[in-house]
Amino acid sequence: GMSAASFWGFRVLPSLLLLASSSGTTTLAAALKNRSSPLLAWTAGALPTRRLPHLRGGTACAPPSSASSLSCFAPAPRLVPGLRALSMTGSAQGYLRPPQDVVDLVEAAPTPSILVQPSQAGSEWVVLLQPSSMLELEDLAAPELKLAGVRFDPEGGVPSRRIGYSSISLLHRETKKTATVTNMPAGRIYSVRWSPLGDRVVFTALDPSTGGMHLYSFTPSDGNPAAVKVTPLPLSGVFAASFAFVGGGDKVLLNTIPPRPAAPERSRVPSAPSIQSNTLGDKAPARTFQDLLGDEHDEALLAYHATTQLVLLQLDGSAPPQEIGPPAMLTWYRASPDAKHVIVEALSGEFSRAVLLSRFATDVLIYPLEGGGGGQRTGQF
C-alpha cells in the first residue's frame, strides 16, 4: 500500500530505506519481516537478475515469486560512504537538516541587485538590494488564490511565492563607503524605486504584525538612514502596481485596499447549473489556460480582491490622503507629465471563463489631480 520512489535508478519504498555513512563495502538493504531490521524492496523488475552480484556483504536474495517482483534481505546493512544516517519514519525531531556544507551552499546570499541614483541628483548613491535566498516554509504554507490566471496571497496583497528582498543598503560611488538602512520592517521587501528627482527611495514591504503591505521611504545620507512608514493604508500589488510617482516624486499614487467586509464564501448549493454551449454547432478550437474562472463564486472573489481605491498622497505628510475616483478593479494607472491628471484602466466587470484576466474588457478613464476635483471623471474611452 506504499508508493515507490526512484532512488539511484531503482524503485524503492522511501519510508523504509535506511542510509548511513562509513567506510567499507557498499550494501543496500531493507526491512525484514519485523520492524527492527531495514528492508529494501525492488519492484517491477527494477533490479535485473544479472545485477545480483552487486549486492555483497552477506545480502541474500530470495527467488522471485513472480516476474514482477524480487526481494533481497540482509541481516545487517552495510554503510554507504559519504551519507549520514537518516531515519525517514520518525517526525518527533521535526525537520532534519543536511550537513552544514550543504546548508551553506543552498543558503548562500545571491548577488545583490543595484539601483543607481538618477542623474538629476548626481548619481552619487547606489542602492544595493539583497534578494532573499529562497522562500520560507511560511511562504509555501500561506493561502493562495488562483483566479483568471493570477495567483496571489489574499492576505498580503502580493503575487504568491514572490521572493523579494531581505535588506537594503547604500553604496557611495566616490568613497566606496556603505550605509545600512535602519528601522527596516521585519517583512519581505518589494518594489524599491528612486524618486524621479533622486532625493529619496520609496519601497513597499510586508508588515508581519498586520499581514498587509505598506509604503516606506528614506533619504540617502552619509550616516545610516532610517526607513519611515509613510502611511498605514494597506496596499495591493496583485492586479496593478502598488504605487506610482507623481511629478518630481514629492507625491505618490497609492493602490490601496479600501475597508470591506469579509470575502464571499462559496455556497454549498449552486444557484444555477454551469452550462457551456456552442450555438453555432461548428468546431471552435481554443487555447487552454491554467487557473481560469470556474463559477460565480470565482467571479465574486475576483471582484472582491481586485477592487481597490486610488489615493493621492504627499510623501512629507503635509496634506491628508486624497481619494481619486471611486473604488474600481484597477489594472493600470499613471499620472500625466504635468501632474494634473491620472489615466486609469479598470476591469469593466464583464468576466470570461475561457481567457485570462489580461484579455478581459476594460474601461479607460481620466481623473483630475488638482483643484479638489478628485473623484470627478473627465473622460472615458
Image: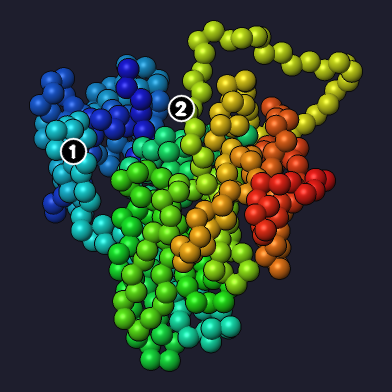
- Mark 2, secondary structure of its residue: loop
Query: Which label sits on residue 94?
Result: 1
At a point 57% along the width and 77% down the height, the residue shown is: 197
Q: Residues within 10 Å of mark 1 (few under 14, many from 20)?
A: few
Q: Residues within 10 Å of mark 2 (few under 14, many from 20)?
A: few
Give the vertical position of 171 relative to 103 (above or below).
below
Real-space Cα separation, disc 1 to disc 2, in angstroms? 35 Å
Figure quadrant of residue 225: bottom left
At a point 57% along the width and 55% down the height, the residue shown is: 312
Q: Which residue is mark 2?
A: 262
Give the vertical position of 172 relative to 90 (above or below).
below
Q: Nearer the viewer, residue 320 or 113?
A: 320
Q: Nearer the viewer, residue 1 or 205?
A: 205
At a point 77% along the width and 49% down the height, the residue shown is: 378
Figure quadrant of residue 77: top left
Please say whether residue 246 is visible from this viewpoint: yes
Please provide percent x and percent y for residue 78: 15, 42
User: Looking at the picture, which amino acid does disc 1 mark?
Assistant: Gly
Q: Quadrant of the N terminus?
A: top left
- Mark 1, secondary structure of its residue: loop
